[in-house]
Amino acid sequence: MQITYGLHAENQLKERGISKRLIEEILSNPEQIINSIKGRKIAHKVISEGKVKFLYRVIYVIEKSKFEVISAYKTRKIVKYWVKK
């Protein structure tokens, strides 16, 4: 799997303390993928940090068999973003 990061994504990951290794893990094994605007997709994965669960959201597009990460963040608002099927 080849993953590229735009400058905006690089800055956000640094600012939010999210490693590229974690992004790779989320993209290779997401718990949920939802479609977003402009042909983007969002990979979801719930990860426990101590006693608190966070939803990690990785916004990306696939271009020429590459994942291009647009943005990523974590939130405790799991119910707000999780899509029930």
Image (cartoon, helix red, strand yellow):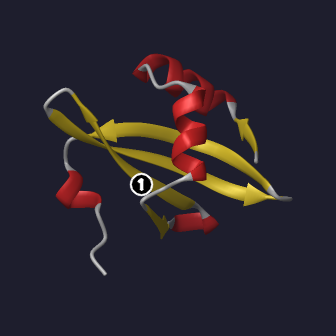
Image spot of residue 12 (x, y percent): 50, 26
Q: Is residue 12 left or right of residue 68?
A: left
Query: In which quarter of the view is residue 74 placed?
Result: top left
Q: Is residue 66 left or right of residue 53?
A: right
Mark 1 residue crowding within 10 angstroms, few (<14) / some (14–19) / many (20+): many
Image spot of residue 83 (x, y percent): 31, 70
Q: Is residue 79 left or right of residue 59?
A: left
Q: Residue at x 53, y 53 (%)?
A: 29
Q: Is residue 77 above or below residue 16?
A: below
Q: Is residue 46 above or below residue 31?
A: above
Q: Is residue 69 left or right of residue 51?
A: right
Image spot of residue 43 (x, y percent): 49, 55
Q: Residue at x 41, y 54 (%)?
A: 44
Q: Residue furthest left?
A: 51
* Kind of residue indicated by mark 1: His
Q: Residue at x 59, y 61 (%)?
A: 40
Q: Nearer the viewer, residue 47 or 13?
A: 47
Q: Residue at x 55, y 62 (%)?
A: 41
Q: Is residue 15 above or below residue 68?
A: above
How many numbered marks have been drawn onto this rendered protein structure? 1
The quadrant the C terminus occupies is: bottom left
Q: Is residue 69 above or below residue 34?
A: above
Image spot of residue 52 (x, y percent): 16, 34
* Label 1 element class: strand
Q: Residue furthest bottom?
A: 85
Residue that label 1 marks = 44
Query: In which quarter of the view is residue 8 placed?
Result: top right
